Each structure stands twice: as C-alpha cells, then as structure tokens.
Image (cartoon, rainbow, N blue to C red):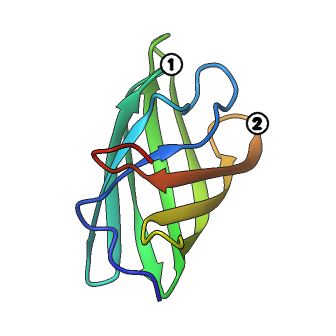
Amino acid sequence: MPGSLDGLTLAPLSDQAAGQVGTRTRFAYHEKDGEIWAEYAGGDVVRGRLVGTREGDRLDFRYVQLGRDGTTASGHCVSLVVELADGRIRLEETWEWESRPGSGTSVVEQVTEHGP
C-alpha cells in the first residue's frame, strides 16, 4: 500500500473547466488514523477544503470551495492512491459535483521541491 499522504503537496496534471481546480491549484494533505483532509487554493480557486476517509489505497471524501468569481461549490470524490516508480504519490480521481451538474476524472501528483 502506498505511504501516508500526511504533509504532502499535490497538484493536478491538467486543467479542468474554467472556475475549477487547475494546474496552479495546490493541495496540502493531512492523514491520521484513516482520516484525510486537505486545504487547497490556486488558479480559479480562492480557498477549498476536503475531508474524508482512507481505506487501503482508496480515498472517499467531500470537498467545498470558493471560486475567484465569488461562487461556492461542493462535491464528492473517490480516489485511488498510486505510488509512482520514483516514489511520489498519484491520486486517480473520479468526482461529481453535488451543488451543480457535472462530473469527471482527474489526476493529481505529489509536487517535490524540484518539481513533479
């Protein structure tokens, strides 16, 4: 099983639609005793939070965010935690908005001081 997410910074590999998470968004993850949470911001997102659980290599969480345009949005995400060959962590995500229509998939990877 891939290691803990605690203290890791992750970033999306590609942009989603306007007003959503993108390559300039950074997620600061925390993990303890099967609980996960993160703060995120950057790009079109002023501030976001997520909270949920981890069982093995599966994350299940809800998120809420404030956009630069002043709108709020919330949703649900299930992610697969993958350890890359270089030891970094990747999350393969399947998400769905709960506050508005829309769903999709995305990939975020651990950011190191020297880049991804």
Tell me the residue at 54%/33% (across/down). 21
Tag shown at residue 101: 2
Going by the numbered disc 2, the residue's amino acid type is Pro
Q: Residues within 10 Å of mark 2 (few under 14, many from 20)?
A: few
- Res. 47 in view: no
Tell me the residue at 53%/73% (across/down). 85
Q: Residues within 10 Å of mark 1 (few under 14, many from 20)?
A: few
Seen in the picture, residue 85 relative to 55 is either above or below; the reply is: above
> Secondary structure beneath disc 1?
loop
On the image, the x and y values in percent for residue 37 come to 33, 60
Residue linked to disc 1: 71
On the image, the x and y values in percent for residue 38 come to 33, 53
Tell me the residue at 50%/54% (across/down). 109
On the image, the x and y values in percent for residue 98 come to 64, 45
> Secondary structure beneath disc 2?
loop
On the image, the x and y values in percent for residue 48 come to 38, 37
- Res. 20 in view: yes
Going by the numbered disc 1, the residue's amino acid type is Thr
